[in-house]
Amino acid sequence: MSSSPHLRLMAILFLLGTGWGITQPLTKIAVSEGYEPLGLIFWQLAIGAVVLGGYRVLRGKSIALPRRLWWFFLMIALLGTVLPNSFSYRAAAHLPAGVMSVIISLVPIFAFPVALMLRTDRFGWMRFAGIFMGLLGVVLLAGPESLPDPSMVWWLPVALIAPLCYGFEGNVVAKWGMHGLGPGHVLFGASVVGAIISLPMSLASGQFIDPRVTWGPPEYALILSSLIHVTVYTGYVWLVSQAGAVFAAQVAYIVTGSGVVWSMILLGERYSLWVWLAMIMILAGMFLVQPRQNDALAE
């Protein structure tokens, strides 16, 4: 890879990471006035389905959702959005957005033991050390001096469910594939199916968000976050096709760091030394457990 294309790919990697990172403080704004998870999840999925569907139509790609694969779309919707966001939205209402950015970076650390369980990867002492460092980072976050309010510590286990779900999702796809569909097609199908199941759930639970309300920061934050997520995910898939999964996986470091920085800029958050140490430990753990060039999960 010559220097000029490499610099271009690095610039795209940085843009994708900073775009993903800003969704954490936007999520904090979206839940700031009492919106419940199922209402937010429905609109996130509905917006994603419309944007992805429109993009695929413009590109002349199929938007057909084979009935035989609806169970697969449902599984991806549940593991990739409905379940993790149900917990992360709850936790985001109580934890600083920067702390949420650090916690979400635990995905590869959770993914490795799941991969061992599903036999899609092999044990390695370096990766075991990465898991240990990631867990040590969580312990530092739970310390009495880490969070602005010690009572926030009870929301850390709730926040941890999201990266655990993402770890399962990635391993399920790695083991059983995408049934002949591309990543964009799968995400579109999961968004459609997820919106279909989350709409009656949000209505029945009284969590539906009526778009006819007077719009303020939470509503705009939800729309912006959903649009950014769809855009950067599409860009991430393109980056994987151009530079490989190992190169693209480095976006996780930028997402974490930029999420913390965006939270400081947009929300005025400040963190204790223990939070910074926890982030360093978790990022080091991510480095140790991330897929290598010759690993099965790197494809």
Image (spheres, rainbow, N blue to C red):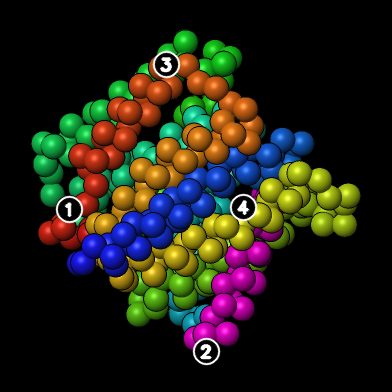
Q: In terms of sequence position, does the residue under pointer 2 or pointer 3 come before the other?
A: 2
The image's mark for residue 292 is 1
Amino acid of disc 4: Ser
Neighbour tally class for label 1: few under 14, some 14-19, many 20 plus, Cα within 10 Å: some
Neighbour tally class for label 3: few under 14, some 14-19, many 20 plus, Cα within 10 Å: few
Residue at position x 66%, y 54% in the image:
224
Quadrant occupied by the C terminus: bottom left
User: Which mark's residue is nearer the viewer, 3 or 4?
Assistant: 3
Residue at position x 31%, y 35% in the image:
283
Measured from the top left, where is residue 213 in percent x and y? 87, 51
In reply to whether residue 104 is colored magenta, the answer given is: no
Magenta-drawn segment: 38-63
Per the image, the residue denoted by label 4 is: 225
Measured from the top left, where is residue 66 in percent x and y? 49, 82
Measured from the top left, where is residue 65 in percent x and y? 52, 80
Residue at position x 62%, y 27% in the image:
268
Amino acid of disc 1: Arg
Q: In terms of sequence position, does the residue under pointer 3 or pointer 4 come before the other?
A: 4
In the displayed structure, would residue 291 be above or below residue 93?
below
Tell me which corner region of the image, top left, top right, bottom left or bottom right, holds residue 295: bottom left
In reply to whether residue 55 is colored magenta, the answer given is: yes
Per the image, the residue denoted by label 3 is: 273
Tell me which corner region of the image, top left, top right, bottom left or bottom right, holds residue 22: top right
Q: In terms of sequence position, does the residue under pointer 4 or pointer 2 come before the other?
A: 2
Amino acid of disc 2: Gly
> Disc 2 versus disc 3: distance between alpha carbons?
51 Å
Q: Secondary structure at mark 1?
A: loop
> Disc 4 versus disc 2: distance between alpha carbons?
26 Å
Per the image, the residue denoted by label 2 is: 60
> Disc 1 versus disc 4: distance between alpha carbons?
31 Å
Residue at position x 65%, y 64% in the image:
47
